[in-house]
Amino acid sequence: METAGAAQDASTGPLSLVERFQALVAVAESITSCRDPEELFRRLACQLQRVVRFDRLGLVLLQPERGVTSARVLETSGTGFTTLAEYPVDGNHSGWVIDTQQPLIVPDTAAETRWPLAMAELRGHGIVSFCSLPLTTARRRIGALGFGSRPPLTYTATDIAFLGEVAKLVAVAADNALNFDEAQATQRQLSTERDHLRLLLEVTNAMVANLDLPGLVDAISSSLERAIPHEFTALALHDKSTGELVIHAVAAKSGDGRRYVGKRFTGSAAGDALTAGKTLLFGGDAGRFADTAAAMREAGIRTVCAVPLVVGDCGLGTLTVGTVQPEAFTPAAVEMIEEVARQVAMAVANALAFREIAQLTEKLAEERLYLESEIRTEHPFEEIVGESRPLRDALRHVETVAPTDATVLVLGETGTGKELIARAIHDRSGRRERTFVKINCAAIPSGLLESELFGHERGAFTGAIAQKSGRFEVAHGGTLFLDEVGEIPLELQPKLLRVLQEQEFERVGGTRTIKVDVRLVAATNRDLARLVGEQRFRDDLYYRLNVFPIHVPPLRERPEDIPALVRFFVHRLARPMNRHVEVIPTETLEALRRYAWPGNVRELANLIERAMILSKGRTLEVPLAELKRRRPRADHEDRASTLEAVERMHILRILGETNWTLGGPRGAAARLGMKRTTLQSLMRRLGIIRPRAA
């Protein structure tokens, strides 16, 4: 303990041990029953005045991180609290007490010379004597507790010991209060950070949920409003072609912000922020921007915060927030808006990229549709070659039925191109973007056909080690082509009928009903009506398949298409075979036209492939001798489907034998026993056209 100056006449007065103990108990009760520091200080002064004389009670708190002390003083006269200026710890009497952890007694402030400024301030308040005691807990040094008296006082050793006990209690109370304040400050900080993170999460969710900019700005403004009250939020993007900022979205509390959408600004506060690449605040100084000032006056805006939207080195635009309150954007608010703007910049970049991709996709779709229409105009049925009337009739049926979902039965001999007809139906239907699935019913053993069509569950039969989806499931939403449908076993036909009628089935070994949406196209080279009569094909399934039959004419019924088919196959095989065939002899084409073609187009394709292999020069060398050893044409004449077809075949044969000479004694008309004009009329009716020369 240090005592300065001589003892004066007055003293604190003798007190009994009981009174001092009661005072300590009262101080302890004040500490436990009161949390508010000011209220605690008042109670402390009231209790201590019973045992200690003082006119001024001071609480000095140490600010170790800043190296200063702050003090609050309570006058017992009732004038209330006074906050004193901060003092450095060094060179201050309170700092000396905190540093030495010893009480300081100054009987006369006028006689104390070590801290002249502090003593002068005390004398200015009329304080003559005072003592100061350290406030310290086991955790830290809190500060000092000071008692000042206007009359001179003498503090005895007993007084100082008692006040030391009081200081210990006050130190604990002050430490608790400081801890409570720190906890409150930490809680407020955590709450602020939580709100900040919640805002960023909401902005992120808004970015995910809104690819269009107006919806994004509305969501962002709504989330931002809870943290930073504001009047409007505007999103402007930079137009590289003009250098202007164009408003793309506005969210406003009052008025219709949409009227600003599309407005361009050549000179604006937001433009300055984008050019500078940093956040700028504008209030009364926005008058230098005529466009900005006018908009602010109209909406009653007093302060604007403009944040540039930057991704990498690319400036996309600005996010502008306006409020009716002046000086409303604190540094913390600006920092939060900048955090939001960084996320908005990414959202805008994604939205612009999405818009560009959508535009390119639309452009590509338009180009695709145009090219497809051009291709279809030039080649309406890509690999279906021919201009004969029977073929044109079949293709007209394809055009008619394709847009519907009706079941189609394609009839024709083997090798006539039934699969091409099925593909043409699919490509011209509304299902063309989905799968075209084909299955040859004759190529799969009858015991496995059910599994192939409908799938099976694991363990359904020996070897079924895993679940398998059938062709109907694979073709869901598309088209299923059943080739050689006449070969389906009789016991499997009811299940096929059910899926055609109900669009549902169960896998082999399964109990779960599977719904599908499949368009069926079936094909066969057999006479299904005859099979029905022989009870080898169900009549109800036949009627269900025969909704829209299309007959594919055999090649012998359209010999005028043979030259075009030959040229088509030559062109298709030339590149892979590295051949340069340019000439097809006329006599070769005539020989090919006269042949019956029991294998139809497939047989012709195989013959041309062999001819391409044999051809070494520019002329196609067809092994015509092979045709003589094959099945004669007469065997097929009685297989024509109608009398008109028989008549047409007979006329074509005579025309071929007469080299398409109509008149004269050796012409086709004379051989057929009719006039030339009658023959010409008959040819027009039957769609017979002289083929072009090779």
Image (cartoon, grey):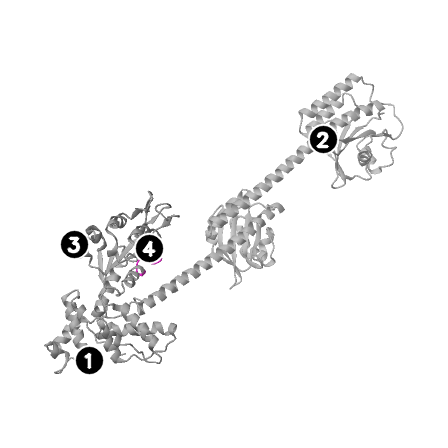
Comes first in the chain, label 1 or label 4: 4
Amino acid type, mark 2: Ala
Q: Residue furthest right?
A: 6
For disc 4, the marked residue is 478
For disc 3, the marked residue is 533
Q: Residue furthest bottom?
A: 665
Circle 2 crowding by C-alpha within 10 Å: few under 14, some 14–19, many from 20: many
Query: For the residues carrying marks 1 and 3, which lies nearer the camera in this image?
Result: 3
Per the rendered image, the range of residues in magenta is 427-438
In contact (CB < 8 Å): disc 2 and disc 4: no
Secondary structure mostly taken by the magenta-highlighted segment of the chain: loop
Amino acid type, mark 1: Asn
Circle 4 crowding by C-alpha within 10 Å: few under 14, some 14–19, many from 20: many
Q: Is residue 275 left or right of residue 500?
A: right
Q: Image height check: is 675 above or below 220?
A: below
Task: Point out which mark residue 174 bears.
Answer: 2
Q: Name the element at disc 3.
A: helix
Amino acid type, mark 4: Gly
Specify whether residue 262 is in view.
no
Q: Is residue 225 left or right of residue 424?
A: right
Real-space CA distance between mark 2 and mark 3, rounded to the nearest whole angstrom: 109 Å
For disc 1, the marked residue is 659
